[in-house]
Image: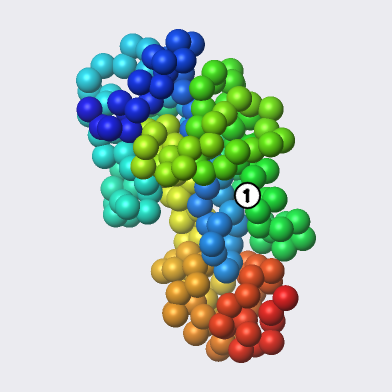
Amino acid sequence: MNARFAFDLERLRAAGDGMVIGGADEAGRGCLAGPLVAAAVSFDYAGWDEARFVALDKLNDSKKLAPARRETLFAAVVAMARQVVVVSRAPGSIDRRGLHVCNLQALGCALEGLRPTPALAFVDGFRLRDCAAPHEALVGGDTRSAAVAAASIIAKVTRDRLMRSLALRYPLWGFAEHFGYATQQHQAAICEHGICDLHRLSFNSVAYQQLGLTT
């Protein structure tokens, strides 16, 4: 069995409160452009047979998976999860309210969207003070818990698909290749074409400094 499933099941047995577990994670926190996307996933392990665990055996931190593998696992998670919730925060909101605030609120909203609320839930790396749903911060959660790894994949694939779609509206910046991260290609595009509505002006970068757009 995947070690992340073993972790979830061990923690559920220790808690002694059913077989439903939740996990939350985000994608796009470190980007220069595009939204931040948070996802929450709940699994109800009661009644799962070996085939379900095998189908999700490759669950892991989305950053460690090839794009094709992420897409396959995305479909499997959606098919087998008890519930999936996705929340996003736009670049303008990130600039007005701050990245960290938006990140915590998006994770909290996603986790609170799981109904009924799982008695046990993990959030990758963060304790969410204003979140009403019971949860535990789990450092490295997307490599330790299957529920968090699943949320990581949902958030990453959802955001990548959105950035590919937005690339058709903003073709000069190459969003379908770098998805808004601060790659050399992206910074070169900013230097050549300036910025668009998708860019977060609250970030400093070499490309922004060259354009006099630091904040």
Please state the horizontal and vertical placement of residue 153, each as a whole percent of the image.
41, 44
Please give the name of the residue rendered at 52% of the width and 47% of the height, measured from the top-left corner.
26
Q: Quadrant of residue 96?
A: bottom right
Q: Is residue 150 in sight in this rendering?
A: no
| Residue pointed to by mark 1 | 103
Please give the name of the residue rendered at 48% of the width and 11% of the height, measured from the top-left corner.
17
Judged from this view, the residue extending furthest toward the right is: 96
Q: Nearer the viewer, residue 20 or 123?
A: 123
Q: Where 136 falls versus 141 (above or below)?
A: above
Is residue 169 left or right of 144 when viewed as pictured? right
Please give the name of the residue rendered at 60% of the width and 57% of the height, measured from the top-left corner.
35
Please give the name of the residue rendered at 58% of the width and 62% of the height, measured from the top-left corner.
34
> Which quadrant is home to the N terminus?
top left
Q: Nearer the viewer, residue 48 or 145?
A: 145
Please state the horizontal and vertical placement of residue 82, each as a whole percent of the image.
46, 23
Report crowding for label 1: few under 14, some 14 to 19, many 20 or more residues within 10 A (C-alpha).
many
Q: Where 118 falls versus 25 (above or below)?
A: above
Q: Nearer the viewer, residue 175 or 155?
A: 155
Q: Nearer the viewer, residue 65 or 195?
A: 65
Is residue 14 left or right of 213 when viewed as pictured? left
Q: Where 42 falls versus 19 (above or below)?
A: below
